[in-house]
Amino acid sequence: MSAPHVSREAFAAAMQQKTQEYLQQVMASVNAAPDGDWIAASEEQVRNLSADFRHEVFQEALQMRADAAEAAFPPSARPEQRQAFGQ
């Protein structure tokens, strides 16, 4: 039996705030760059923001899948409970 999938819609909803924050940070970085130097003055910061965001997105996707898998399977009985059931 394979682990349950997480809906794309649920994942997108969970990431909505972080996505908004990321986009706002990118625009703030570009806006802070001096005229005539937009690319050079903001490219590294935007690249770092993007790397951090990519990491957060992947981490959240994995966590949501792990949570869904955990919720799909009931906890197993403790060893002393298993022995009691077998008696």
Image (cartoon, rainbow, N blue to C red):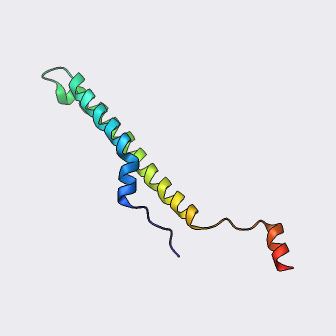
- Farthest right residue in view: 87
Screen quadrant of the C terminus? bottom right
Task: Using residue 37 as the reference point, say whether residue 4 is left or right of it.
Answer: right
- Residue under the image location 50 percent in, 73 percent down: 2
- Farthest top residue in view: 34
User: What is the quadrant of residue 5 in the picture?
Assistant: bottom left
- Farthest bottom residue in view: 87
Task: Using residue 13 as the reference point, say whether residue 66 is left or right of it.
Answer: right
Image coords of residue 79 (percent x, y): 80, 68
- Residue under the image location 43 percent in, 61 percent down: 6
Task: Using residue 65 as the reference point, say whether residue 25 is left or right of it.
Answer: left
Q: What is the count of numbered marks? A: 0
Task: Using residue 24 as the reference point, say whether residue 38 is left or right of it.
Answer: left
- Residue under the image location 19 percent in, 30 percent down: 39
The one nearer the camera, 45 or 6, is 6
User: What is the quadrant of residue 83 in the picture?
Assistant: bottom right
Image coords of residue 70 (percent x, y): 57, 62
Image coords of residue 74 (percent x, y): 64, 67
87 shown above or below 54: below
85 shown above or below 27: below
The one nearer the camera, 27 or 12, is 12
